[in-house]
Amino acid sequence: MAKSPEVKLAVFGRAGVGKSALVVRFLTRRFIWEYDPTLESTYRHQANIDDEVVTMEILDTAGQEDIQQKESHMRWGDGFFIVYDITDRGSFEEVAPLRSLLEEVKKPKNVPLVLVGNKSDLDHVRQVGTEEGERLAAEMACAFYECSACADEGGAVAEAFHELCREVRRR
Ligand code: GDP
Ligand code: MG
């Protein structure tokens, strides 16, 4: 029997955007309010995606790494999430530089990437419009999801993970 494919996914984004909450939501379908923000973890998870069992290794970065650590995480990964918080414009502004670093590290490869705008439940304090996220994703030629780790209606979080796996498998 063919060995099931393995994909390495790394989650990037400013500290506090909800990377850990998103990963844990995906893995457990639950929301946990508080994580140690300095913690970096990897998880293994199997999922059936388009009738294929895929093993994911997921690296939840802390978001406070120096550039060498970032680059080494980028070399490790096959596919990447860049997460921002829709209530934190600064986190949105960090997306493009992260993408540039990714391109630089992975050159000349085309980098499988998904952009995630998290905390969509906090629409009343939103600082980044949905269209801005869509526009940036179009510029980066990647998929875009707005979602909420704490109120994940419709399973957008799992959809984003599955889409990134597909993107990696297509390469
Ligand atoms: P990380 O530093 O990117 O890993 O962020 P965390 O996952 O530790 O989340 C940072 C803070 O944002 C925590 O207080 C979480 O409870 C909160 N948080 C994460 N995701 C959401 C979300 O979708 N909605 C809301 N309202 N809060 C969230
Ligand atoms: Mg974290």
Image (spheres, rainbow, N blue to C red):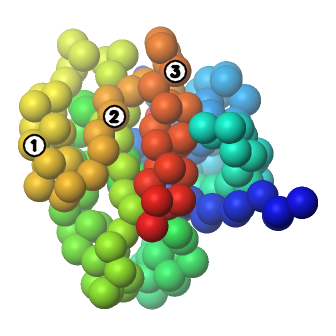
Q: Is residue 87 above or below residue 162?
A: above
Distance, label 3 to label 1, CA atoms, is 23 Å
Task: Give the structural element (helix, strand or loop) at label 3.
Answer: helix
The answer to whether mark 1 and mark 2 are in CB contact below 8 A is no
Relative to the observer, which residue lies in front, 104 or 19? Answer: 104
Task: Give the structural element (helix, strand or loop) at label 1.
Answer: helix
> Picture coordinates of residue 34 (x, y %)?
61, 34
- Residue at label 2? 145
Relative to the observer, which residue lies in front, 54 or 99? Answer: 54
Residues packed near mark 1 inside 10 Å, few (<14), some (14 to 19) or many (20 plus): few
Can residue 63 be seen?
A: no
Task: Give the structural element (helix, strand or loop) at label 2.
Answer: strand
Q: Is residue 105 left or right of residue 29?
A: left
Q: Residue 155 — which label?
A: 3
Q: Amino acid at mark 1?
A: Arg
Q: Quadrant of the C terminus?
A: bottom left
Q: Is the residue at mark 2 in contact range of ligand 1, meaning its CB lies under 8 Å from it?
A: no
